[in-house]
Image: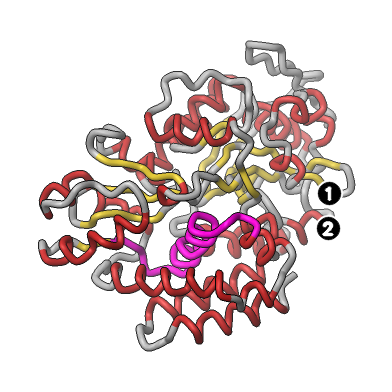
Amino acid sequence: MNILRTVFAGTTALCAAGAVSAADLEVTHWWTSGGEAAAVGELAKAFNEKTEHNWVDGAIAGSGSTARPIMISRITGGDPMAATQFNHGRQAEELVEAGLMRDLTEIAEAGNWREVINPPSLLDACTVDGKVYCAPLNIHSWQWLWLSHKAYEDAGVAVPTNWDEFAAAAPKLQAAGIVPLAMGQQGWQQSGAFNVMMISLLPKDVYLSVYGDKDADKAAGPEVARIFAAAADARAMSADSNVQDWNQATNMVITGKAGGQIMGDWAQGEFQVANMTAGEDYTCLPGLGVNKTLQAGGDAFYFPVLSDGDLNAAQGELAALLLEPETQVAFNLKKGSLPVRGDVDLSTANDCMQKGLDILATGDAIPDVNQLVSSDTRTQIEELFTEFFADASMTPEAAQARFADIIADAD
């Protein structure tokens, strides 16, 4: 059962320590949009070509909020998949503590993960009591404002360079029949936009105090009040954005039906599928063009404990393969995310990815919300913003009071 794969510098060499039978490895994830499917295809291709095993795709339609409960239910109910996507952070914390996730420490040590993963906090997020329980795959950041050149040209307005210019241009877009801000009607998108504003429009110590220190007084204070006022502006600008899924909102930007969208860098994959060129057809503003910092969040793969020896071997091979340089480059170029390895060549990355790489190189990255709060706290915040964006009569002051109460009880 102890099949280790050794990573040789500059090459991909997965060598079995013993005879292994081919296995069908079910992998669950929530990557179903055009750009996401293309990226997953790179993982499946690498696994099928470089091992004797077969990737069995277990895509779950919808967002992570839809998929995670299904994944967790299967694992706790005795019907685990062989590998599953979660975000970096605390989403699988209880599963690890219950002994339901495989210890990957030997594989991580063989692959020198501690030396190559950047920032180190990503591997720290996979580590419990000194043991590694997940394989980091990519770095996703939420702090992006995506802008349609067509929409602003049609409205006769210059493409904004920051959030204030974006908000100021909204009336002219509306007069031209263009939605200023595309946003899907889901709590994770709306709370995500709020958190982007928290990081981008305020000093980052405010964000860290609220989510890291669980400072309810700071959450109720005047600085955060400014962000709730901005969220109310976003609510008004997105009032006519009658779509559900994030990629539908991205398509509004791609087609010029909306001026912009606050969304993570995974949106980049949709622009690529549409054959659009960064800097020519669309603009990306990290940190809303204000505070150019990124959250070091993203995706990792966990491997439920299984009793089948062949599946165990296949799990180990996939875990090692995910960190291989070739896999990192192929997946992340399609996904729009950044690699977790700091030693890979991304010279072919587009303008937006280069902006992210430049920020990451400065070390100006901060932990993602998922790394700082529990799943229960995150769900409460999402529910608050679902209600806030759906009900224009809810004042920013009332929403902030509820937010502060959530932070006061957060874990």
Q: Quadrant of residue 26?
A: top right
Between the C-alphas of marks 1 and 2, the distance is: 8 Å
- The answer to whether residue 40 of the structure is visible from this angle is no
Residue 236 in picture, x, y percent from top left:
30, 73
State the quadrant of the N terminus. Answer: top right
Q: Viewed as shown, does residue 167 lie left or right of 307?
A: left
Q: In terms of sequence position, does the residue under pointer 1 or pointer 2 come before the other?
A: 2
In front of the other: label 1 or label 2?
1
Q: Secondary structure at mark 1?
A: strand
Q: Are marks 1 and 2 in contact (CB under 8 Å)?
A: yes
Say which amino acid is labelled 2: Glu
- The answer to whether residue 217 of the structure is visible from this angle is yes
Judging by the rendered image, the residue that carries numbered circle 1 is: 128
State the quadrant of the C terminus. Answer: bottom right
Q: Tell me which segment is drawn in magenta.
A: 181-205
Decide which of 82, 165 is in the foreground and name it: 165
Judging by the rendered image, the residue that carries numbered circle 2 is: 97
Q: Is residue 83 above or below residue 225?
A: above
Q: Viewed as shown, does residue 348 lie left or right of 127?
A: left
Q: Which mark is residue 402?
A: none
Decide which of 332, 196 is in the foreground and name it: 196
Residue 237 in picture, x, y percent from top left:
29, 68
Q: Is residue 166 above or below residue 124?
A: below
Q: Quadrant of residue 139?
A: top right
Say which amino acid is labelled 1: Val
Mark 2, Cα crowd under 10 Å, few <14 / some 14-19 / many 20+, is: few
Residue 190 lies within the magenta run: yes
Residue 156 lies within the magenta run: no
Toward the right, the furthest residue is 129
Residue 30 in picture, x, y percent from top left:
50, 51
